[in-house]
Amino acid sequence: MELRIQHPGGSEPPGSPQVVEDGGEEDEEELSGGEEAEFRSSSGRGSLLTRRGITLRVLLKDGLVEPGDGVLAIHYLGKNFVGDLLNDGKIRWVETGQIFNSPSAWATHCKRLVNPAKKSGCGWASVRYRGQKLAQYKTTWLHKYQPSADMSMVSEEDDDEDEEEGKAAVQADEKNKNNKPDVMVSRRADRERIPVRYCSLGTRDAARDPHTLVELSAFSAINRFQPFNVAVSSNVLLLMDFHCHLTTSEVVGYLGGRWDTNTQLLTVLRAFPCRTRLADRDTASAVEEEICQNLFMRGLSLVGWYHSHPRGPALPSLQDIDSQMDHQLRLQGSNNGFQPCLGIICGPYYHGNQGVASTITPFWVVPPPEQRPNDYGIPVAVEVTYVQDNFLTSDVLNEMMLLVDYYRTAPDLVQFNQYWCPETTMLDKIKGSLSCHAPKDQAYSQILEHVYSQLSTTH
């Protein structure tokens, strides 16, 4: 099976940079290139161009700003983000290579990484071009080309939002120090995504939200038997759970193991976290090559994949269903033989979970009936036997430390000193969840404490 790192939701692989259009509830509606040209030709510069019509493309066309690498920046609650201004007025985030259509789309995305409760980004007031707010360049354009324009049209965006939120962050830190938080920090960021039943989906509909979550069916409910048995090592669960806890963004990884055709047993022995941003083609290729080499050296086969839903239920979305089906077909190979491909979803920070333990959901997808080829595949729950390992291998410990190093400076790193719920910090939460998989031997508890100590120094 060819490795191909995909976005957990099943979007295009890293070769296609993700273009982000959503700028939050207050995002300005930027004109498309065609609309902008039509506007200029029909109205001329003498006519009043509204605030929403002044885009980065306008500023570029009139020479007030120039494209360049690293010329854009956002400073928000102690975090710094750097962007490239492209020739077409779009913004490329240096960290991930993602493409954003407007300043507000980029600002909203970055701010939500730091503060998931953030609803909008106020991009023209938040993004700076060579040290100055973009709102000031917008004002300059109006002064130069439309001196009669009402300056309130631009000043309304240039607020002190960042400063006020900075004060709020300091107050929140003080609350944390008192160990008596009034609110559960992460609960505010939970997204209500209500799962639907598979029977309610019907034929594929392009208008349906691809992030719609779908309840799992049982094999017995569709008159089938589970066609294979699965055994998963506790070290796999521990490493996977650890990876999913580190960041507020979705993560992805692969599963290595063996498939025994005689016993129809799929044994999952290793997890291989992908230490890469999902839009970074070059890094993804290197990660895939490294995983292939690790599988080969250990005599293992690729038997599945995992990804996280950080704050949502550990149920597959419509995109996850299509992605899982794609993996199953690729793993099956050209000889039309059968080898199962296991999908696992981990939900670390969903407040609907029972206690501090993550919800871990193994699933598989049954193809739709032949007479209904345009239906979605049927997501079914897979029964799994979990095998407790006697010790943590050096491979697992090494992977954990590599993950800590990789996410240490990431803007979407979980703030482990914040509170998951009253009396329980994020660090306590990850300890409690991993204790479900860790060996009971005291020596290995001490080793894990060393890993946790590294997390506490990441801020």
Image (cartoon, grey):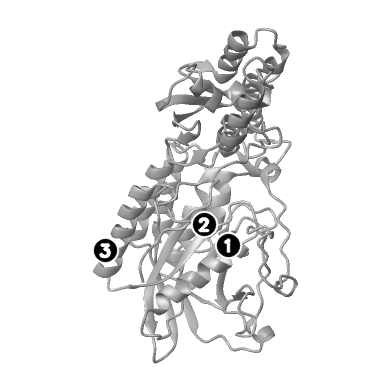
Comparing 415 with 374, the one in front is: 374
Comparing 322 with 38, the one in front is: 38
- At a point 65% along the width and 29% down the height, the residue shown is 172
The circle drawn on residue 319 is: 1
Q: Do the residues labelled 1 and 2 touch (CB within 8 Å)?
A: yes
Disc on the earlier residue, 1 or 2: 2
Residue 68 is situated, as x and y percent measured from the top left of the image, at: 40, 26
Label 1 Cα crowd, 10 Å radius (few <14 / some 14-19 / many 20+): many
Label 3 is placed on what type of residue?
A: Gln
Disc on the earlier residue, 3 or 2: 2
Secondary element under disc 3, as helix, strand or loop, is helix
Residue 47 is situated, as x and y percent measured from the top left of the image, at: 68, 17
Please determine whether, in this image, residue 201 is positioned above or below residue 429.
below
The answer to whether residue 382 is visible is no
Residue 303 is situated, as x and y percent measured from the top left of the image, at: 41, 73
Residue 102, quarter of the rendered image: top right
Label 1 is placed on what type of residue?
A: Gln
Name the residue tied to disc 3: 293
Residue 148 is situated, as x and y percent measured from the top left of the image, at: 70, 8
Q: Nearer the viewer, mark 1 or mark 3?
A: 1
Report the Cα–Cα distance between label 1 and label 2.
Answer: 7 Å
Q: Do the residues labelled 1 and 3 touch (CB within 8 Å)?
A: no
Report the Cα–Cα distance between label 3 and label 2.
Answer: 26 Å
Q: Do the residues labelled 3 and 2 touch (CB within 8 Å)?
A: no
Secondary element under disc 2, as helix, strand or loop, is loop
